[in-house]
Structures are given as structure tokens and as C-alpha cells.
Amino acid sequence: MEKFTNILNRMKLHMEKYKEETLKIEKSSLKPYTSVSCKSMYRLIFAIVFEKISKIY
């Protein structure tokens, strides 16, 4: 259970970092392109995280 909460906390940190990055990018001119890449980025992160969680349990 401790490992699980550590992973969740790490995920929160990553999400915050990506939110900051996406906000920076969205302020620039590449708006339509980045919104698509961000969604795929989130999917990739969650896929990796869930894979790691399933290996632990």
C-alpha cells in the first residue's frame, strides 16, 4: 500500500509538471498541435504507470 501511495504522489508531481509545460506551450503559437500531443503524452504516462503498478501487485 505504501508503494502505491508513493506512485500516486509521483504521478501528481508529473501531472503538475506537464500542466506547467502545456500552459507554457499553449501560450505560444503552436496551440492546436500541442493539445493533441499532450493528450497522447498523458495516455503514455498512465499506460507506463499502470504497467508498473500491475507488476508490483
Image (spheres, rainbow, N blue to C red):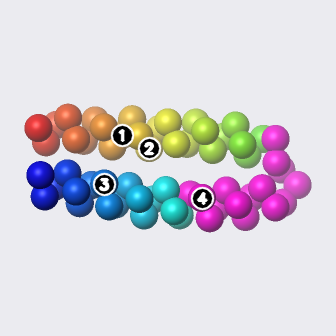
Q: Residues within 10 Å of mark 3 (few under 14, many from 20)?
A: some
Q: Is residue 5 magenta?
A: no
Q: Residues within 10 Å of mark 1 (few under 14, many from 20)?
A: few
Please tell me whether mark 4 sits on a helix, a strand or a loop: helix
- Quadrant assignment, res 40: top right
Number of marks drawn:
4
- Quadrant assignment, res 20: bottom right
The location of residue 46, given as percent across then percent down, is 41, 40
- The label shown at residue 6 is none
Q: CA distance from mark 3 to mark 2?
A: 12 Å
The location of residue 42, given as percent across then percent down, is 52, 42
- The label shown at residue 19 is 4
Residue annotated with mark 3: 8
Of marks 3 and 2, the one in the foreground: 3
Check contact, mark 4 vs mark 2: CB within 8 A: no
Secondary structure that dominates the magenta span: helix
Q: Amino acid at mark 2?
A: Ile
Lower position in the chain sequence, tag 4 or tag 2: 4
Lower position in the chain sequence, tag 3 or tag 2: 3
Please tell me whether mark 2 sits on a helix, a strand or a loop: helix
Check contact, mark 1 vs mark 2: CB within 8 A: yes
Which residue occupies 30% across, 37% down?
50
Q: Amino acid at mark 3?
A: Leu
Which residue occupies 49% across, 56% down?
15
Q: Amino acid at mark 4?
A: Lys
Magenta-tinted stretch: 18-32
Of marks 1 and 4, the one in the foreground: 4
Residue annotated with mark 2: 45
- The label shown at residue 48 is 1
